[in-house]
């Protein structure tokens, strides 16, 4: 194996040191590690060289070629410029890196490690104690499945998996994965289900026997819609259901600063004269919306008269239940 | 997927730019940076010492040797001493990681990092359209000073809004550990106002800034989890028959009994009454606290407060 490793490093060094474009034949004769023509035919050499270029591209090298079969390294696209980070910024990158590298539910740990190594000189600060547990349900399984899904999404390859939905029904799905998101400890994939020809969201923790199409690895199975944005599929807890309605919520001035985090960018915010915010949002589950308003408070209330009255009645029952005697 | 040779070659190329002329770096430090063992790094450096450019004479080979667990660079390195840009997959990984701390595509730090080191083919905006992690935009304004305080043992002044009050309190904290659980970041810190260890949700911190004052880290055992329930008192709560109970929403909870009508009695550890009262009130009458009385009273007070 070390011969292959040395050859790859030598090729990288050679291309970086070359004064101009080089031909394949020069690479073969000048880079230590490539067998000469008496030991390897031209076709086998070509395959080896192609694999090596792909490996270097995966490592961040930008290798260009022209129709005459000459190759060169695009220095501007290959080498990073100076990065200037403040002490706080370095600390932030270091802390989040430290936490996620050890989280089995973070599916990009290996690539993150290479990324952090490449910027190591600008985040050369002491380790900050930090721990991440993105997922609380089978984190390693979710991490591994998301890595597969992400590779498939990047290469535009169809995936197949068995899925158990929330009512316990099992079905095998063929999906074109467009994007991924994580929310509240669970990873989800968004993609077009080819059986029903609809874009759907699937919880990764409910998948089994996940495989990606491995045939013709360099050719895409599908095109992702140009306007796809995974954020459109990330719902708040009260946005699941079949009965959409528009809700308006008041966010008191004292907690208006929390609006970006509370609303997650969904809906429309309007500032009221007293400094409070009016948030208009499409909801689909009245009970979950009321629950959310209480959970995420203080400082949140319903502005719709009907919803506000329903919430008041519910809270009266809470108060009555917890008065001295209660239901006991 | 990359094979072991490709992965090792990437590691060798990644460590190249850590080496500069006349530097001495402990193998342990390189191993930590690259996530490999010391023996793997030692083997990598042996391999690297055999690499170079034509004519592969001693002057064109890697000027490195390893002695007593330290790698020493004794001459000019070949052309790859500059940092190579992130590949598309690396940019993807870093972008997703930073998102998890609230550093979104438009954050100036992300823009600078990706412009200087990212791949020109992929913009952070494009990355965000396909992979989204938790943490809200703007969270980095809190995350960064807290991380700095944690790293350099600097006191951090925060404005914090607890679950029990609309207004914020100002606190000086000594950060001891950052925790991310299910997409929510917390900092475990010694709170000088409370005179004790406290866990603060970062998305309830309105502002944070590091002070110049340094602190000596205290010898306080850390919980290591945001919702630690080990030594806490417990409350007994009853779920109505049709009310959904998910243990992950009630950390440390246990089902005590299931009644004939299908209702369940659950024991739930609690650190303070505010969080538990809010969780119970949010069930809008489908969950009742049976004991202790202080939590029952907290729920009644909360409901009355919300009604007023």
Image (cartoon, coloured by chain):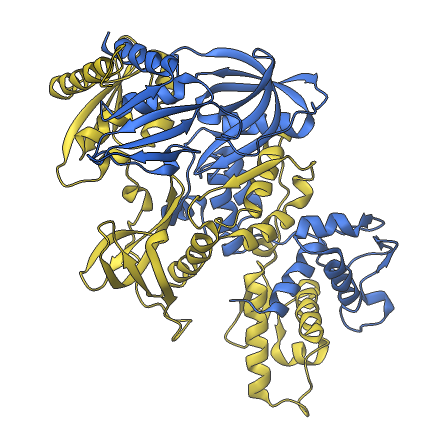
Chain colours: A yellow, B blue
Identify the residue at horizontal 47%, vertical 37% (top origin).
B181
Left/right of residue B179 with respect to residue B182 in the rendered view: right
Above or below residue A185? Residue A91 is: above
Identify the residue at horizontal 78%, vertical 58% (top origin).
B77
Above or below residue A72? Residue A46 is: below
Above or below residue B111? Residue B88 is: below
Q: Position of residue A158 (x, y in %)?
A: 33, 65
Left/right of residue B44 with respect to residue B188 in the rendered view: right
Above or below residue A92? Residue A119 is: below
Work out whether residue B215 or residue B245 is closer to the camera in this orientation and state it. B245
Q: Position of residue B259 (x, y in %)?
A: 25, 34
Q: Position of residue A84 (x, y in %)?
A: 63, 36
Q: Does residue A294 appear in this view?
A: no
Work out whether residue A138 or residue B97 is closer to the camera in this orientation and state it. A138
Q: Does residue B160 appear in this view?
A: yes
Identify the residue at horizontal 61%, vertical 24% (top origin).
B175
Query: In the current view of this chain or complex, which residue is farthest to the bottom?
Result: A38
Quarter of the image where the C terminus of chain A is located = top left
Count of numbered labels shown in the rendering: 0
């Amino acid at each position: 194996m070390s011969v292959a490793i040395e050859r790859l490093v030598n090729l990288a060094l050679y291309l970086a040191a070359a004064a101009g474009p080089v031909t394949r034949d020069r690479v073969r004769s000048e880079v230590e590690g490539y067998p000469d023509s008496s030991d390897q035919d031209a076709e086998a050499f070509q395959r080896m060289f192609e694999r090596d270029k792909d490996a270097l591209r995966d490592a961040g090298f930008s290798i260009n070629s022209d129709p005459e079969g000459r190759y060169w390294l695009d220095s501007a696209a290959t080498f990073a410029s100076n990065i200037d980070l403040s002490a706080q910024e370095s600390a932030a990158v270091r802390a989040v890196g430290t936490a996620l590298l050890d989280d089995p539910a973070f599916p990009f740990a290996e690539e993150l490690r290479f990324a952090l190594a490449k910027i190591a000189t600008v985040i050369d600060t002491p380790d900050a104690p930090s721990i991440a547990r993105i997922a609380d349900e089978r984190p390693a399984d979710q991490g591994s499945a998301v890595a597969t899904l992400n590779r498939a999404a990047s290469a535009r390859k169809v995936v197949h998996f068995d899925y158990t939905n929330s009512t316990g029904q099992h079905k095998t799905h063929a999906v074109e994965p467009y994007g991924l998101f994580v929310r509240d400890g669970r990873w989800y994939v968004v993609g077009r289900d080819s059986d029903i020809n609809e874009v759907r969201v699937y919880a990764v923790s409910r998948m089994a026997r996940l495989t990606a199409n491995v045939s013709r690895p360099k050719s895409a199975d599908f095109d992702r819609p140009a306007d796809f944005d995974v954020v459109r599929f990330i719902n708040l807890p009260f946005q699941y259901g079949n009965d959409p309605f528009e809700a308006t919520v008041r966010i008191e001035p004292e907690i208006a600063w929390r609006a970006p985090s509370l609303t997650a960018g969904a809906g429309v915010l309007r500032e009221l004269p007293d400094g409070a915010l009016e948030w208009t949002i499409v909801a689909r589950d009245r009970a979950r919306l009321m629950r959310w308003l209480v959970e995420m408070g203080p400082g949140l209330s319903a502005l719709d008269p009907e919803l506000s009255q329903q919430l008041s009645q519910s809270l009266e029952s809470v108060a009555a239940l917890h008065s001295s005697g209660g239901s006991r | 997927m990359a094979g072991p040779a490709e992965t090792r070659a990437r590691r060798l190329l990644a460590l190249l730019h850590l080496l500069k002329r006349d530097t001495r770096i402990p193998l342990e430090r390189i191993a930590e940076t690259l996530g490999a063992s010391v023996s793997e790094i030692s083997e990598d450096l042996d391999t690297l010492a055999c690499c170079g450019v034509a004519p592969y004479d001693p002057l064109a080979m890697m000027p490195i040797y390893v002695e007593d667990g330290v790698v020493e660079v004794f001459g000019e390195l070949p052309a790859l001493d500059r940092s190579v840009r992130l590949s598309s997959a690396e940019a993807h990984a870093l972008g997703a990681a930073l998102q998890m701390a609230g550093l979104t595509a438009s954050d100036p730090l992300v823009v600078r990092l990706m412009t200087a080191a990212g791949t020109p083919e992929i913009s952070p905006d494009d990355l965000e359209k396909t992979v989204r992690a938790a943490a809200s935009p703007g969270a980095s304004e809190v995350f960064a000073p807290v991380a700095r305080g944690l790293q350099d043992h600097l006191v951090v002044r925060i404005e914090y809004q607890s679950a029990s009050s609309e207004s914020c309190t100002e606190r000086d904290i000594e950060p001891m550990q950052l925790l991310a659980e299910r997409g929510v970041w917390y900092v475990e810190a010694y709170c000088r106002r409370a005179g004790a260890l406290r866990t603060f949700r970062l998305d309830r911190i309105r502002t944070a800034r590091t002070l110049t004052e340094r602190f000596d880290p205290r010898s306080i055992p850390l919980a290591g989890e945001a919702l630690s329930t080990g030594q806490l008192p417990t409350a007994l709560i009853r779920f109505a028959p049709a009310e959904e109970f998910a243990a992950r929403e009630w950390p440390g909870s246990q089902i005590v009994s299931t009644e004939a009508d299908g209702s369940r009695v659950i024991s739930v550890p609690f650190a303070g009454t505010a969080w538990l009262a809010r969780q119970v009130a949010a069930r809008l009458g489908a969950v009742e606290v049976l004991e202790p009385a202080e939590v029952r009273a907290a729920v009644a007070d909360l409901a009355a407060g919300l009604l007023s």
